[in-house]
Image (spheres, coloured by chain):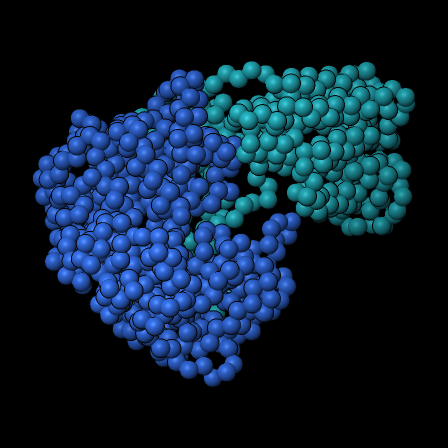
């Protein structure tokens, strides 16, 4: 069984970028979302992430995540409108709510709720994009130079997730075919299943531990990583990451992307605002248009017979 | 290379030692086959050879094991692992990284090898094992055979001097199993790697082995050349005999054969098989196609008469994955009461999916399945059924008695042997008091020795005689021949052959029993007893005619 949100090699520019650079690029998008509060800028970043997913062949996985985002974002907006007592532009009055005071709903609280929901959505999407497009083994391999055992433990944990999920599925199927079981939903049945699942996970852990012993886990030495030349994608995504960060800082310091929700909304929309948002989008999406030298899942460099990584 | 001096070892909490005074010396460059029934100490012997015993498992050990000059009392598995590669039964538990390349790199990187030598070793081992196309793949997405090859690559990446293999082919189909043994043989030729392999299907490994040992009750009961092992087995442990050796023993012929060709040569020398002339080959092909030699057919056990309505029927059943391939493609099948049917085919052919549909664990995307009643399904891993601390708590006394497990009622289910676990799981899934009309078993013989397989085949046939329809998905042609009267061959989700086992298992290469391969499909004989009878009845002259 394979989890839908785990990394798989795909022939896309983002997947072809080394893991450290890919992570840096995503982190810069996240930093931009932290620095900026302007709804237009946040919407731009959100759209950039969705476009990246589309251009990286991850649209189907992202569709499922969008449903989750709707379930998280809408309550954030709703709750902020209800609980925020700041803002001066009232659009509905709920009257006296006793200990909660006057139930005045303001446009400012609504807009701030939207801004906050946009930021939360961006971070969820960045997390998902990272888990789908960044090779965890490669990141761990980099970390092995610093702490071999910690990095290896992290790798085993990542490997164990789909393995234990598959074990659990197998276990559930076996229970469905049993003739005699305590009634469904009873505490006894749950306790039995929990105990047996735990035993099964322990067995699996023991086997994995034996394998690790034989592979030299106990006598582990600090491992040096292999130096690889920078690919065209490594360079373009690095430049893109720095450009995104610089534009976000410029937008905040030079005020075209400044934003204030309370007490009255201050949200300038000028040519400079639109130009900066467009520049962020362009800086982020340009590296994705370069489809030369892609590394494909199981076949190495596309168009070459030898393996390149 | 490997030396055991008076080694006795007891697992923590165990009453009896698993190894008793073992003295053994394996020389550099040897391929040594370790034979023995389940629970006799083969796996413990291998665990002691790589230092997992006693460092990982604990327990009490006396005597001395030295590997490549390292004493396992003072050197742990990590250090010994630099000289020894190990491959065990379950490929899932031997892969610890998420990608194939990282998996193969791990043992080298953990020993501080420099990056360039790691990269070179990965490329070389991948090319040697023919898995270079898998290097960028995720380990979770590989098939069982691919996983086993990747685990072998990780074990071989550091060019170990000794490779230990514990039933490495038990979860593989016949094609992947033969491929793995061929690879080991090649590695031995190229690198002079010493190989110690424990395996139940001796016929698969004997011809590659230079030496064989038999382990019985924790002792090395026999040590010598592979052909003599079969002579010893004929008198001391019949369950270790290969089908070919059994066939020749039943015909009073010697020596026991190490391969199909050796068996044919012995039969020809005795005038019981015609010479391998083109005319005779043609005659055998004709026989396989159901021609003239059918008149010598050995009668197979008769099944109960069907009442007209099938017990289970698949009508144009498709299973198409969302955004993926079709696992079943228009399967139409009918199973009668009292039938024993073997589903065969390579890994991924659709056998397990078909059984899961029968039991209602999966729904077809097109077509329909009709069953006269509920279907009992025993899935691949029997331990998935065990929820309680004792055998007695898992199944009723009547069910345990029927499964011959009553004497083990106070044991923990996970402490049972492979065959006993399978019988207990069967008692849980299909107890005598609530026996369903159809019993389906998915790869029930994985890791089982020949004796346990024979007992399971008897159980399947006895259930069929009582009117139950038994469907078994298996890679093992010997087991299929022993338990099933009908064989269905699947490939890419389609039924490509459906007929009597005497026809289907007699005429193949991979999906054929050893007896059938030796006799070239003569009379549809599949098992050594049938083969011996067919040879006696036919006589060499009659065949030649």
- Looking at the image, which is closer to me, B20 or A269? B20
The quadrant the N terminus of chain B occupies is: top left
Quadrant of residue B475 in the image?
bottom left
The quadrant the C terminus of chain B occupies is: bottom left
Figure colour of chain A: cyan
Q: Is residue A90 left or right of residue A124?
A: right
Q: Which chain is blue?
A: B
Residue B260 visible in the snapshot: yes
On the image, the x and y values in percent for residue B446 come to 35, 55
- Looking at the image, which is closer to me, A174 or B34? B34
- Looking at the image, which is closer to me, B252 or A152? B252
On the image, the x and y values in percent for residue B480 come to 36, 63
Question: Is B181 situated above or below B369?
Answer: above
| Residue at the image point whose x is 63% and y is 32% from the top | A11
| Residue at the image point whose x is 15% and y is 52% from the top | B255
| Residue at the image point whose x is 17% and y is 26% from the top | B69
Q: Is residue A83 left or right of residue B341?
A: right
- Looking at the image, which is closer to me, B331 or B532? B532
| Residue at the image point whose x is 49% and y is 58% from the top | B490
On the image, the x and y values in percent for residue A29 come to 69, 26
């Amino acid at each position: 069984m394979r989890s839908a949100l785990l990394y798989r090699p795909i022939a896309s520019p983002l997947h072809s970028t080394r893991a450290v650079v890919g992570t840096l690029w995503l982190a810069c998008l996240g930093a931009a979302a932290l620095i900026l509060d302007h709804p237009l800028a946040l919407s731009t970043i959100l759209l950039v992430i969705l476009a990246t997913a589309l251009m990286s062949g991850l649209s189907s996985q992202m569709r499922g995540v969008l449903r989750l985002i709707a379930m998280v974002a809408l309550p954030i907006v709703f709750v902020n409108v209800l609980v925020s007592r700041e803002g001066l532009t009232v659009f509905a009055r709920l009257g006296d709510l006793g200990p909660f005071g006057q139930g005045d709903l303001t446009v400012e609280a609504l807009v701030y709720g939207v801004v906050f929901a946009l930021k939360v959505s961006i971070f969820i999407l960045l997390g998902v994009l990272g888990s789908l497009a960044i090779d965890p083994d490669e990141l761990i391999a980099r970390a092995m130079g610093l702490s071999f055992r910690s990095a290896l433990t992290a790798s085993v944990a990542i490997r164990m997730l789909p393995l234990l999920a598959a074990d659990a599925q197998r276990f559930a199927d076996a229970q469905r075919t049993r003739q005699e079981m305590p009634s469904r939903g009873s505490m006894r049945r749950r306790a039995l299943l929990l105990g047996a699942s735990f035993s099964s996970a322990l067995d699996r852990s023991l086997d994995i531990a034996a394998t690790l012993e034989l592979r030299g886990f106990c006598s582990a030495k600090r491992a040096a990583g292999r130096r690889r030349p920078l690919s065209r994608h490594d360079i373009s995504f690095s430049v893109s990451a720095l450009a995104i960060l610089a534009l976000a800082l410029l937008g905040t310091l030079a005020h075209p992307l400044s934003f204030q929700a309370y007490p009255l909304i201050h949200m300038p929309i000028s040519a400079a605002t639109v130009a900066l948002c467009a520049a962020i989008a362009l800086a982020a999406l340009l590296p994705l248009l370069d489809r030369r030298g892609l590394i494909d899942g199981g076949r190495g460099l596309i168009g070459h017979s030898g393996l390149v990584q | 290379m490997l030396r055991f001096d008076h080694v006795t070892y007891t697992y923590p909490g165990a009453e009896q030692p698993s190894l008793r005074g073992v003295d053994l010396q394996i020389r550099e460059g040897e391929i040594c086959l370790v034979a023995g029934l389940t629970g006799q100490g083969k796996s413990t012997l291998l665990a002691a050879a790589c230092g997992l015993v006693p460092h990982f498992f604990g327990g009490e050990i006396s005597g001395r094991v030295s590997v490549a000059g390292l004493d396992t009392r003072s050197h742990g598995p990590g250090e010994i692992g630099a000289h020894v590669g190990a491959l065990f039964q379950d490929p899932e538990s031997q892969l610890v990284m998420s990608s194939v390349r990282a998996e193969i790199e791990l043992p080298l990187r953990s020993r501080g090898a420099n990056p360039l030598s790691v990269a070179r070793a990965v490329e070389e081992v991948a090319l040697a094992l023919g898995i270079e196309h898998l290097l960028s793949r995720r380990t979770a997405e590989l098939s069982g055979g691919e996983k086993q090859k990747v685990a072998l690559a990780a074990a071989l990446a550091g060019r170990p001097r000794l490779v230990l293999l514990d039933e490495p082919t038990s979860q593989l189909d016949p094609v992947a199993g033969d491929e793995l043994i061929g690879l080991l043989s090649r590695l031995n030729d190229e690198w002079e790697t010493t190989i110690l392999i424990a395996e139940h299907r001796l016929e698969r490994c004997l011809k590659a082995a230079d030496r064989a040992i038999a382990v019985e009750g924790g002792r090395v009961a026999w040590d010598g050349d592979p052909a003599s092992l079969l002579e010893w087995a004929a008198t001391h442990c019949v369950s270790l005999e290969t089908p070919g050796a059994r066939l020749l023993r039943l015909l009073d012929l010697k020596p026991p054969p190490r391969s199909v060709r050796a068996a044919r040569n012995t039969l020809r020398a005795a005038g019981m098989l015609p010479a391998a002339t083109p005319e005779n080959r043609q005659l055998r092909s004709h026989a396989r196609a159901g021609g003239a030699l059918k008149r010598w057919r050995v009668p197979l056990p008769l099944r109960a008469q069907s009442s007209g309505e099938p017990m289970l029927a698949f009508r144009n059943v498709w299973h198409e994955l969302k955004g993926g391939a079709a696992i079943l493609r228009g399967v139409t099948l009918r199973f009668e009461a009292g039938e024993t049917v073997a589903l065969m085919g390579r890994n991924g052919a659709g056998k397990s999916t078909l059984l899961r549909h029968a039991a209602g664990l999966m729904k077809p995307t097109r077509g329909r399945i009709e069953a006269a009643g509920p279907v009992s399904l025993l899935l691949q891993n029997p331990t998935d059924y065990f929820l309680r601390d004792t055998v007695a708590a898992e199944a009723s006394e009547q069910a345990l008695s029927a499964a011959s497990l009553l004497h083990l009622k106070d044991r923990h289910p996970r402490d049972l042997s492979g065959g006993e676990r399978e019988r207990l799981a069967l008692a849980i899934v299909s107890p005598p008091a609530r026996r369903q009309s159809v019993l389906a078993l998915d790869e029930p013989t994985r890791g089982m020795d020949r004796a346990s397989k024979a007992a399971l085949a008897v159980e399947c046939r006895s259930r069929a005689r009582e009117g139950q329809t038994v469907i078994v998905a298996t890679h093992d042609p010997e087991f299929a021949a022993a338990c099933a009267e009908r064989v269905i061959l699947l490939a890419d989700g389609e039924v490509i052959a459906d007929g009597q086992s005497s026809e289907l298992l007699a005429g193949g290469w991979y999906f054929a029993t050893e007896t059938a391969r030796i006799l070239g499909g003569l009379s549809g004989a599949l098992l050594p007893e049938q083969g011996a009878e067919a040879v006696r009845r036919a006589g060499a002259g009659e065949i030649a005619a």
